[in-house]
Amino acid sequence: MKTSAPGRACGIATVLLSLLAVLHTSTPQKNDIDIYSLTVDSRVSSRFAHTVVTSRVVNKANVVQEATFQVELPKRAFITNFSMIIDGVTYPGNIKEKAAAQEQYSTAVARGESAGLIKATGRKMEQFQVSVNVAPSAKVTFELVYEELLKRRLEVYELLLKVQPQQLVKHLQMDIHIFEPQGISFLETESTFMTNELADALTISRNKTKAHIRFKPTLSQQKSPGQEDTVLNGNFIIRYDVNRTLSGGSIQIENGYFVHYFAPEGLPTIPKNVIFVIDKSGSMLGRKIQQTREALIKILDDLSPRDQFNLISFSGDATQWKPLLVPASAEDVNQARRYVAGIQAQGGTNINDAMLMAVQLLSNANQQELLPAGSVSLIILLTDGDPTVGETNPARIQKNVQEAIAGQYSLFCLGFGFDVSYAFLEKMALDNGGLARRIYEDSDSALQLQDFYQEVANPLLTAVTFEYPSNAVEEVSQDNFRLLFKGSEIVVAGKLQDQSPDVLSAKVRGHLHMQNITFQTEIRVAEKEEEFQSPKYIFHSFMERLWAYLTIQQLLEKMILASDAEKQALETRALNLSLQYSFVTPLTSMVVTKPEGEERSEVAEKPVETENKRKHFHLAGPSGKAPGNPGRIGPQGPVHSPSHHLTYHGVRDLLLPDMLLAPSTPDEVDLRIKARVPAIPSDTMTHRHQERKPSGSSADTSQPAKTDSPPAPIQAPPVILTLPGQSVNPLCVDIKHSQGPMNLLSDPDQGVEVTGQYETEKAQFSWIEVTFKNPQLQVRASPEHVVVTRNRRNSAYKWKETLFSVTPGLNMTMDKAGLLLLSSPDKVTIGLLPWDGPGEGLRLLLRDTDRFSSHVGGTLGQFYQGVLWGPPAAADDSRRTLSVQGRDYSATRLLKLDYQEGSPGTEISCWSVEL
């Protein structure tokens, strides 16, 4: 029976929590703590996600052991409950005002107990961790609950869960239930640890409004091949969207509260005037300026011909590319591309002058009536450091920019890396109707820049306001917004009055390009409330909690802009809501009681995006002083066992010296399984002849082999094709002549096209691109990584990291050898591989080629159009002629390396053709 912890004196650990599921225990079976059950239950009701992570462990040793429960969760989430059940006694977590918890924390430090610490876990995630002593044969149940409102970005909602048990778990299960009254229009899952062997453990079922995703692997499925450890280590992502119409949106009601989702379909894009303000100071030298140039060139290509633009680059001085804004014509865009390609990094950072120059450009154009009527004007600033030249006071720069913009234009600030004050950029952006975003220094930084631009590239409405009858609703969240962009969504929530009408009406007003528009919606309250009464997995009063969550988030944002007098009232309301609904926010903390005898307490304040990862921070040791080794995490000196600690690790912007983040995808730290393909031993290739003819051909003995120099190794051809009816020897294609991108194959009936750039000097592809029509999706592979683009949204994946993505109409898988397969029922399977054996470079492979239609074409596709083989040559049976669409090719049978099963490859006999 579960009972509350006794009220008598007991050790109290204070944890200052924050927003953000990893299933992780840092004490695997090596110390006899066995996780025998690990479950995640996530219920998404009308975009609001309620996630419960439960871990059950047992101490199989005959001595006391320490068990650690660690969970990663999204930054935007609020923890709402935590508890431990030990020997039938429940030790709950209680939400308190941060000041009260801090007082307990300070007292603990004064007593000589250790202080807490913070560590980073990724771009989107934060980490919660708690440890407790477990007696021999005793069991402990940990349970953490958190909630978040899923935000629509580039036409999808994303639910991100982490899976890292670090040991085999007898009962491991994840259940994700989604209920959307509007109807689910799109659903995909993606995993960075899933393999084909685990595919049977994943089941997905859905109907019009509901979806259920279950992942329940057996013990044997969890095992690494030939080992006893687990393969489960990485992300599990669900993305989905809902049905929409050209209307006032969807109003949903539950238990006296309403939420209004607004993202109408079919609206035309408003033309924009955009000025890119680019930092080219010395700190941008190297990779950052290279990635910035790369991203800007792509962004320029995405400008609409109806847009106007200009570029300002700055270091110690600011320089504008053109004296006026110019239309995004093909000629002007090409000129801008050449200008961007020549930007070099050097000098200081004069943000003030650059920003005022950008505002002046727009203001002059406005005064001269050069801005199209009804257009939207945006300024996009990218910088990697604080101001060092000219006006360097951040507050004065913010004031100068706000006074110059005067509410006429929207400012978006991108902070590149962690040497820039994010608080400075965030306030400047919010002051001027925009937002700030951090760009993480990584291999995908250019993609991060492109993705951000795509979010603001297509404005649909300006001056959006929501109106409801004053006698029907109250306590409505923010109801006016400067801009609505394509692919996003505006959310408004509120409370129904006790005597509200049976019919709730709403008006949404906004400005299109050249006219005003009003959307009007009416719904019957009783009918709408019934929608949430039938699904068994909808948690009660979720809409009230959604309203509280949304209101708190908006109050926290308003606090950034408020004066000191206004800030106090906003903080008080946000704090009261946080306490009332048990949310761990930047204003609250969670106090967790622990059993008697647990003397130590560790605490970590909730991190915020404004902090700097490279700042030194104070870790109080037993004496209350900073420990001597700042690079080490945890207590200094000898470790005394058993030890107990309770910490909340925040990812916002804190990076310990010994916790450098691994390269990652655009949104989270890299925790995927990595395995490098073994290098080919040199002695296995030393004595092979390059392109040696198979034994048995008439040419084998024509000349004795020379022995004055080691023969070159057998090479892997750029492409191996298995032709219909040619079951013995495949076709190896060597490309000797290539100018520009090549149309490798296209099949309109299959809805697929493959293009590539072949470098004849290096004898390899520099990139290969696969484009699908249904689903509309593009996969671009380079030697560095693979980029998947769908609905203007980019996802980057590094080679040899496992990937398992299930999208309607297409499956994408990548194994630890780096083989990426794009497959679909009744369609040709296309494979891409980063071959690092002899003749290294990207390789293309095709499977199920009998599914090609009669309309297939292209440099490689032509060979699937009725190939005619001539007889072997009379003097040399290793030579033949094949005819393709009236053109003859000479084919020679040679030994090549087959790359299709990965390195080191196997020798095969194939017909080699030069193109």
Image (spheres, rainbow, N blue to C red):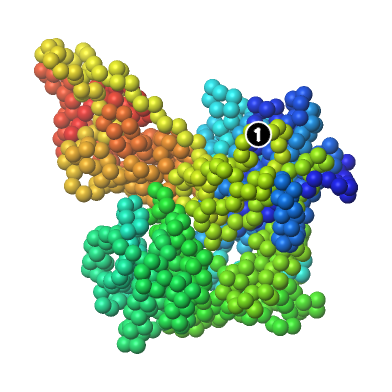
Q: Tell me if 182 is positioned left or right of 739 in this view.
A: right
Q: Secondary structure at mark 1?
A: loop
Q: Quadrant of the N terminus?
A: top right
The relative height of residue 772 versus residue 814 in the rendered view (above or below) is below
The relative height of residue 326 versus residue 88 in the rendered view (above or below) is below
Residue at 52% across, 33% down: 196
Residue 49: x %, y % from top left: 66, 55
Residue at 24% across, 69% down: 332
Residue 305: x %, y % from top left: 31, 71
The relative height of residue 141 versus residue 109 in the rendered view (above or below) is above
Residue at 56% across, 81% down: 509
Q: Nearer the viewer, residue 131 or 834?
A: 131
Residue at 49% across, 63% down: 422
Residue 637: x %, y % from top left: 62, 36
Q: Which residue is mark 1?
A: 639
Residue 628: x %, y % from top left: 57, 43
Q: Tell me if 667 is positioned left or right of 343 in this view.
A: right
